[in-house]
Amino acid sequence: MLRRLTEFEAGNSGSFVIECKSQPAFCGAIEIRDIEPEPSRAELSFWLAFEMWGKGYMSEALQPILCFGFENLELNRLYAYHIMRNPSSGKVLQKNGFVQEGVLRQRVRKMGSI
């Protein structure tokens, strides 16, 4: 938590919590991180509780964050990655205007596999 606050204060990232409207409780997070002012770009990452998948919550939550990134932070580019075995994340990105530019094989090891 302290690292997130330090990153935010330095202007390097911004983290946001996702709550459900029906029962206010933490169900996910979105982060704009690795903000690079000179090329005006940053990475977008997100996580949503499994039981919330497929209900449109992430797309709804992403819209104001994307506006924040482009309008308030004045970013020229937001990029994102997703693990190939999770095509739903790719669909969320595509639905929100992201375009696949390539595949970075074995970029991340998560939960014991690539």
Image: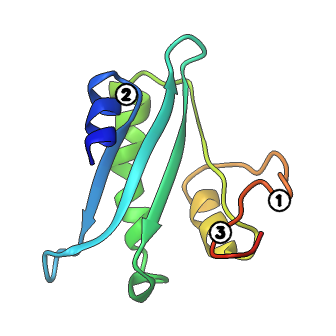
Q: Earlier in the sequence, mark 2 or mark 3?
A: 2
| Residue depicted at x 41% and y 34% | 69
Tell me if label 3 and label 1 are in contact, CB under 8 Å: no
Quadrant where the C terminus is found in the figure:
bottom right
> Where's residue 72, x and y in %?
32, 26
Q: Position of residue 13 (x, y in %)?
A: 39, 34
At x 60%, y 68%, the residue is: 89
Cα distance, mark 3 to mark 1? 10 Å
The residue lying at 15 percent from left, 82 percent from top is 22
The amino acid marked with disc number 1 is Gln
**Rendered location of residue 51, percent (x, y):** 40, 89
Q: Are marks 1 and 2 in contact (CB under 8 Å)?
A: no
Residue 85, image x, y percentages: 74, 76
Above-or-below relation of 73 to 44: above
Q: Report the disc number at residue 106.
A: 1
Give neighbour class at mark 1: few <14, some 14-19, many 20+ (Cα, 10 Å): few
Give the SS element for disc 2: helix
- Going from N to C along the chain, the mark reached first, 1 or 2, is 2
Position of 24 with respect to 56 (left or right) is left
The residue carrying mark 3 is 110
**SS of the residue at dot 1?**
loop
In this rendering, is residue 71 above or below 81?
Answer: above
Q: Which residue type does callout 2 highlight?
A: Glu
- Which is in the foreground here, disc 2 or disc 3? 3
Q: Amino acid at mark 3?
A: Lys
Q: CA gap, disc 1 to disc 2? A: 33 Å
Mark 2 — residue? Answer: 71
